[in-house]
Amino acid sequence: MLKLAAATLAMGVMAGCASQASEEQSGQMSQAQTEANETRSMAREALTTAQQAQRTAQQALQLAQQNRQEMDRMFERSMRK
């Protein structure tokens, strides 16, 4: 009977340790998931900002090309006079 009680107590302690370890792992996994979600959100924001910068650069290039064409036309007109 004493051996059975000791074995039961040992099993209870091991189950408690396993349960606690499982809770710790679950907490770590939850924290890792939260950090992954935050990282994903930051990456989306960075992508949006980069896309906006690309659009702005394309607009600036287009305006510069239009200005150059206009200046070329003005130069040609002044040369004809």
Image (spheres, rainbow, N blue to C red):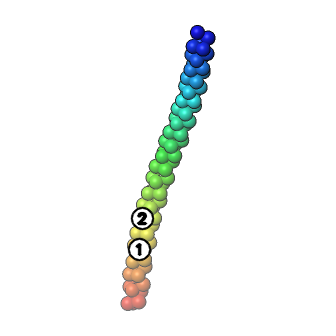
* Label number found at residue 59: 2
Residue 5 bears which disc, if any? none
Q: Residue at x 53, y 40 (%)?
A: 32
Image-based side of 69 in relation to 6, left or right: left
Q: Nearer the viewer, residue 25 or 63?
A: 25
Q: Amino acid at mark 2?
A: Gln
Q: Nearer the viewer, residue 11 or 54?
A: 11
Report which residue position mark 1 lands on: 65
Quarter of the image where the C terminus is located: bottom left
Q: Give the distance between the C-alpha atoms of the residues marked 2 and 1, in whole angstroms.
A: 10 Å
Q: Nearer the viewer, residue 8 or 74?
A: 8
Q: Position of residue 6 (x, y in %)?
A: 61, 15
Query: Which quarter of the picture shows residue 10?
Result: top right
> Hey, what amino acid is under mark 1?
Gln
Packing grade of label 1 (10 A; few <14, some 14-19, many >=20) is: few
The quadrant in which the N terminus is found is top right
x, y percent for residue 51? 44, 57
The quarter holding residue 21 reads: top right
61, above or below 34, in the image:
below
